[in-house]
Image (cartoon, grey):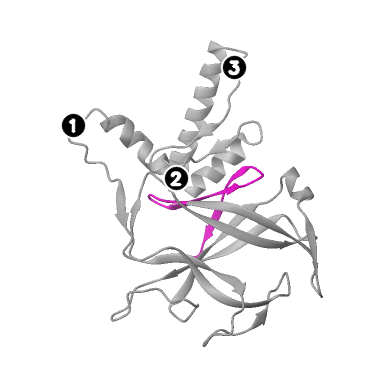
Amino acid sequence: MFEPVVEKILELINGQIRTLRRANRDAKIAAILLVGGFGENMYLLQRTQKEFSPEYEVLQPYNAWSAVVLGALAWGSDNSIVTKRKLSRSYGQEIYIPWEDKPGREKIPHPITGADSSKVMKWFVGAGQEISCTEPATFPLTVYCHADEPEVLVIDLLAWDPQPGRETAPDARDRGCYEVGKLKIDLDWPEIKYLPRSAAKGTGEYYEVKFRMELLFSTDICFRAVFNDGPTRMVRVNYDD
């Protein structure tokens, strides 16, 4: 059903490239940007990348959903653009923190470092929270990776819906928390090889990566990882059915 539309878009992009080449043979195309509501579609991104990568980089900018609207309505004195949204559920991930002898804190070994730890929920955003549609929410993350594993970090994206008499998301994962997708972050960049390695008993060498996750809510949830001593990575999200 969507194939004729996607094919037409790919033809239009090819036409734009040909027009640019005719106007300036030496012009260098930095990237292909997908904007507008349909520009945030993951299938369109995959098809465009298949068609034009690696010759051209294909990007979905954070403001893809609002870019066209903002340009078209910026002149209006009565600006009715949707700039904020109130979330109906919480989104976060389960993380390991250093164990403390507190009620309800189970002591378990960290799967990478082997240190005494506990599992808790880190909520990126909460149900009922008002979120900007144009400015990303940011939060720091520290992860530990096995030195001999593929350089792709996978994070389970969890959600939680408010329940009658319970409006606050739980501190630890329970039956109300469910997986909505997986975040895949590419760690294949040269600087990663020079990060300090540590050894853990029974788990081999590992390294620590610190970065800032940026999250934007528009028609989809968009993620970007910004590393302290490395590149910026758009985060691929594989959503569950």
Percent x, y for residue 109? Answer: 69, 79
Residue 31 covered by magenta stretch? no
Helix or strand or loop: what does disc 3 sit on? loop
Query: In this picture, which residue range is highlighted in magenta?
Result: 215-241
Q: Dot 2 corresponds to which residue?
A: 40
Nearer-N-terminus badge (3/1) = 3
Percent x, y for residue 144? Answer: 69, 63
Residue visible at 68% across and 51% down? 187
Q: Dot 1 corresponds to which residue?
A: 77
Q: Amino acid at mark 2?
A: Glu
Front-most of residues 241 and 90: 90
Relative horizontal placement of residue 16, taking residue 107 as reference (left or right): left
Residue visible at 50% across and 29% down? 13
> Label 3 vs label 1: CA separation?
38 Å
> Label 3 vs label 2: CA separation?
27 Å
Neighbours of disc 2 within 10 Å: few (<14), some (14-19), many (20+): many
Mark carried by residue 27: 3
Evaluate whether residue 26 shows in this view.
yes
- Looking at the image, the residue that sits furthest to the left is 78
Residue 112 placement: quadrant: bottom right
Helix or strand or loop: what does disc 2 sit on? helix
Front-most of residues 218 and 138: 138
Helix or strand or loop: what does disc 1 sit on? loop
Relative horizontal placement of residue 83, taking residue 2 as reference (left or right): left
Q: Amino acid at mark 3?
A: Ala
Percent x, y for residue 24? Answer: 57, 12
Q: Decide: is 145 above or below 217.
A: below
Overall secondary structure of the magenta stretch? strand
Residue 102 placement: quadrant: bottom right
Nearer-N-terminus badge (1/2) = 2
> Label 1 vs label 2: CA separation?
28 Å
